[in-house]
Image (cartoon, grey):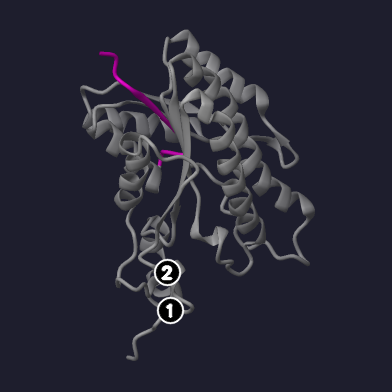
Amino acid sequence: MMKKTVLVTGACINTGVDIVEKFAQEGYDVVFTGRKVENVTDAEKRYKEKFKDVNIIGYAIDSLINEKNVDEKAVENLFKFLDEKGIVIETLVLNAADQGLNIKIFENPLTDFMKVINTNVVWNYLICEHASKRMMKIGGGNIVFINSNTAYRAIPDRVAYVASKGGQLGLMRALALDLGKYNIRVNAVLPGMIKTDRWEKNPDFYAKVPSRFTPIGDVAVGKDIADAVFYFAACARNTTGAELVVDGGNTIQLYPIIPEE
């Protein structure tokens, strides 16, 4: 039986690493991407040392030519590279994102907004288009967006990111409808705050940030997100167009209950 292969975008650091490792542990072959060649090379070496029996391939790709233009040729070249190696992606995990930090409506140029939308929505659509063409040929597959609970709850100075995540959910649902007849499922995981390297580097900020005060008293780690992704990929045979929120319950509360010191 041929091993299944997952493609994970943005998988050199943080949550992307946990997603790659989850699928590798479960016996999948893995293709992953990152923006910089040196980062991809380093990550590929680490993955191969840890998972010696898994075929793991890193590929460097950037989403945009410039703020206004998605790099269509780069995506074509990625899938041409996979075709030439006889690799067919059964699961696509869209983890890469432009975080759109500190975009202020009256200060930033329009191109800053466009850059985030183009990466998080348009570029992801393009990858889905190419991946799903190949999935059709093998009788189906599945796509998982790493979205965000900010698609529903806005945060300050992140207008482009919030808009992109809302748009991404619309894209997910539309693709689920259009691709269902080809046995291609499309779903989304919506993390809240995650303990990434930013958490480690800014302990004073994250000690006080309201979103850390979740109903269950804890914040997600990358493995929590990876488990949710794997559920959609491997366990949710009859689920498409769905959202799975992984945020400790933050989305359900009107405001965080911050303990008195």
The residue indicated by pointer 1 is 256
Left or right of 147: which side holds 206? left
Tell me the residue at 72%/47% (across/down): 114
**Given contact means CB atoms under 8 Å apart, are the residues at marks 2 and 1 in contact?**
yes
Q: Where is residue 94 shown, x and y percent of the image?
A: 49, 38
Left or right of 17: which side holds 151? right
Image quadrant in which the N terminus is located: top left
- Determine if residue 9 is in view: no
Indicate whether 78 appears above or below 212: above
Chief SS of the magenta region: loop
Q: How many labels does the image show?
A: 2
Circle 2: element type: helix
Circle 1: element type: loop
* Residue segment shown in magenta: 1-12
Looking at the rendered structure, which numbered label has been put on residue 59?
A: none
Q: Where is residue 85 shown, x and y percent of the image?
A: 43, 10
Q: In which quarter of the image is residue 75?
A: top right
Tell me the residue at 54%/45% (across/down): 97
Image quadrant in which the C terminus is located: bottom left
Of the pair 203 and 128, the residue shown nearer to us: 128
